[in-house]
């Protein structure tokens, strides 16, 4: 993985809860987050005493490198969003500025947790289509904004094997 090809935009626990309709029961399961990248889901769940392991090839990089990459792309991405207003629905984020603010807060939360989480084995380097875990090692697998989002880059066979 090359950092210059990555847009390290991550989502919050609240966004994960809304996207996956996570129930109280789900939240208390042993969870694996595949392709969690710089999301703050793991950090926020850990702070609440929940169990999440995040797996992503991005985790070969140090926090400062991921952070640096975020700051080098964020304004350009927000400008692209602003230039395509009809492509977006502003019911969750109210504006491009609000989106930027949330992504920044998420990154800060992730970065603050990352080194500690790596040492605790909560951020693990790995990549689909094959992960080094046992069958049924986790009770719930989540994959946010990776599978089916990059269908132009990854084949049907890649998706099938990953699932
Ligand atoms: C758009 S980001 C989503 C991050 C996070 N899941 C979220 O929703 O905020 C896509 C993530 O997929 C990761 N990724 C790229 N190739 C991958 C692979 N082969 N297996 C697992 N994750 C991968 C990237 O590093 C990146 O962190």
Image (cartoon, helix red, strand yellow):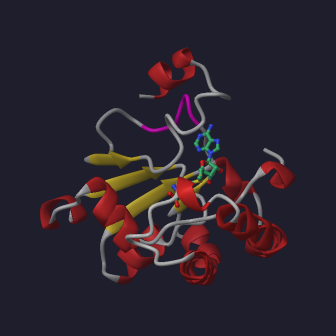
Q: Residue at x 39, y 35 (%)?
A: 134
- Quadrant of residue 68 in the image? bottom right
| Residue 27 percent coordinates (x, y) | 23, 65
Would residue 123 be found to the left or right of residue 63 on screen? Answer: left
* Magenta residues (range): 128-133
Q: Residue at the top extreme?
A: 157
| Residue 17 percent coordinates (x, y) | 30, 65
Would residue 136 be found to the left or right of residue 87 on screen? Answer: left
Q: Residue at x 60, y 36 (%)?
A: 150
| Residue 103 percent coordinates (x, y) | 58, 75
Establish if 145 lies above or below 75. above
The N terminus: image quadrant:
top right
The C terminus: image quadrant:
top left
Question: Between residues 124 and 128, which one lies in front from this camera angle?
Answer: 128
Query: Was residue 113 drawn as part of the magenta stretch in this picture?
Result: no
| Residue 66 percent coordinates (x, y) | 75, 68
Establish if 112 lies above or below 11. below
Question: Between residues 138 and 161, which one lies in front from this camera angle?
Answer: 161
| Numbered disc total | 0
The rendered magenta stretch, by its main secondary structure, is classed as loop
Would residue 7 be found to the left or right of residue 65 on screen? Answer: left
Question: Between residues 27 and 105, which one lies in front from this camera angle?
Answer: 105
- Quadrant of residue 92 in the image? bottom left
Establish if 27 lies above or below 102. above
Would residue 76 be found to the left or right of residue 17 on screen? Answer: right
């Amino acid at each position: 993985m090359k950092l210059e090809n990555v847009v390290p935009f991550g989502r919050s626990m609240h966004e994960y809860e809304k996207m996956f309709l996570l129930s109280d029961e789900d939240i208390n399961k042993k969870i694996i987050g595949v392709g969690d990248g710089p999301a703050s889901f793991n950090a926020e769940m850990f702070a609440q005493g929940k169990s999440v392991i995040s797996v992503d090839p991005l985790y070969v990089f140090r926090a400062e490198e991921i952070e640096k990459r975020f700051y080098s792309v964020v304004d350009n991405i927000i400008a692209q969003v602003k230039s395509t207003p009809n492509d977006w629905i502003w019911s969750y984020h109210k504006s491009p500025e609000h989106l930027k603010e949330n992504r920044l807060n998420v990154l800060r939360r992730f970065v603050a947790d990352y080194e500690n989480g790596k040492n605790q084995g909560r951020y693990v380097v790995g990549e689909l289509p094959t992960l080094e875990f046992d069958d049924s090692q986790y009770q719930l697998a989540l994959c946010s904004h990776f599978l089916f989002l990059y269908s132009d880059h990854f084949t049907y066979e890649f998706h099938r094997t990953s699932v």
